[in-house]
Amino acid sequence: LKTFQGPATGLIVERERLDKFGRPFLGATVKPKLGLSGKNYGRVVYEGLRGGLDFLKDDENINSQPFMRWKERFLYCMEGVNRAAAATGEVKGSYLNVTAATMEQIYERAEFAESVGTVIVMVDLVIGYTAIQTMAIWARKAQMILHLHRAGNSTYARQKNHGINFRVICKWMRMSGVDHIHAGTVVGKLEGDPLMVRGFYNTLLLTELKVNLAEGLFFDM
C-alpha cells in the first residue's frame, strides 16, 4: 500500500477551496449530454451555477464530438463559471472531462483546462488503471482536483456470480489517487440498494470499517 500515493485532497481541502462549510455541496450534470453546441453548453453551466449550484460536470460521454470539440467546450464552460462566480460572489466550478484515446491527448486537454483556470478535471474509469494513476500524479503536481466517473464499471461490478464488486473498485481508485469517485445513488437511473450504496460511501470516506453484512462489509478494514 505504501507504493501508492493515494488522493491528494480530502473533504476539508475541497471545502477550503470552495469556501463552503456546514452543508453538502450541490451539483448536477449538464443535460442533454449530447447535441448541445459549445456556446449552449456554456450557457447551461452559467444558468445552473447562477441558480444556486456549487458545480456542474461533464457527462462521461462528453469528450470531443463534431458538434462540440473539447477546446470549445472548455472555453465556454469556464466563461460560464467565471460569470456565475462574479454574479454570486461565490466560488463555482465545472468538472471538465479530459478523457481521450491516448495519454498525449489527455495531457493536452488537462494542461489546457489548467491554463483556462479550472480547479478540477475528470476522467472515466475506462481509460484504465495505469492512465488513472498517471493522471492522479499529474493532478497532484498541478494542484488540481481529480474526479473519476465510473463509466464501464457495471460490465464487471453488477454480475451476481462473478466479477468485481464496486467496493473493491472504490479501494483501488483511492489507492490510485483520485480525489472524487462517482459512487452511485439510491434513486434515478443509478438506483441501487440503499444499504449497499451507503457501504460504498463509507468505504470511500472512513479510515476504518467494521463488519456490516447489510452494507456488504464482510471483514474489518
Image (cartoon, helix red, strand yellow):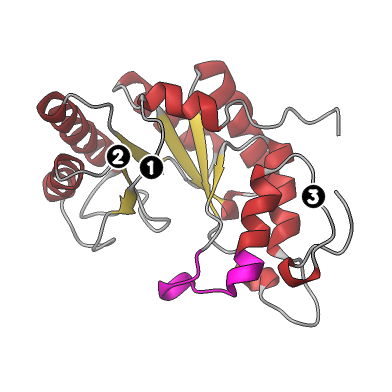
Q: Residue at x 58, y 52 (%)?
A: 125
Residue 137 vs residue 90, the one in the foreground: 90
Three-letter amino acid code of the residue under disc 1: Phe
- Of labels 3 and 1, earlier in sequence is 1
* As drawn, 166 above or below 3: below
Find the residue positioned furthest to the right. Answer: 219
Q: In the rendered image, is residue 115 in sight?
A: yes
Task: Tell me where residue 3 appears, x and y as whole percent.
Answer: 84, 28
Spatial separation of the CA atoms under disc 3 and disc 2: 30 Å
Q: Which residues are magenta?
A: 185-197
- Seen in the picture, residue 190 relative to 160 is either above or below; the reply is above
Whichever of labels 3 and 2 marks the residue nearer the N terminus, that label is 2
Query: Which amino acid type corresponds to the residue marked 2 in the rendered image?
Result: Asp
Specify the farthest residue to the bottom: 161
Provide residue 15's location: percent of width, then percent of height: 44, 28
Q: Which residue is mark 1?
A: 25
- Is residue 195 highlighted in magenta? yes
* Label pair 2/1, CB-CB below 8 angstroms: yes
Residue 58: image location, x then y, percent? 34, 49
How far apart marks 2 and 1 lie (CA) works out to: 6 Å
For residue 54, the mark is 2
The residue at the point 17 percent across, 46 percent down is 38
Q: Label 3 belongs to which residue?
A: 209
Secondary structure under the numbered disc 2 in the rendered image:
loop
Label number found at residue 50: none
Label 2, residues with CA under 10 Å away: few <14, some 14-19, many ≥20: many
Which residue does the image show at 79% across and 50% down from the upper left? 209
Judge left or right: residue 8 versus residue 77: right
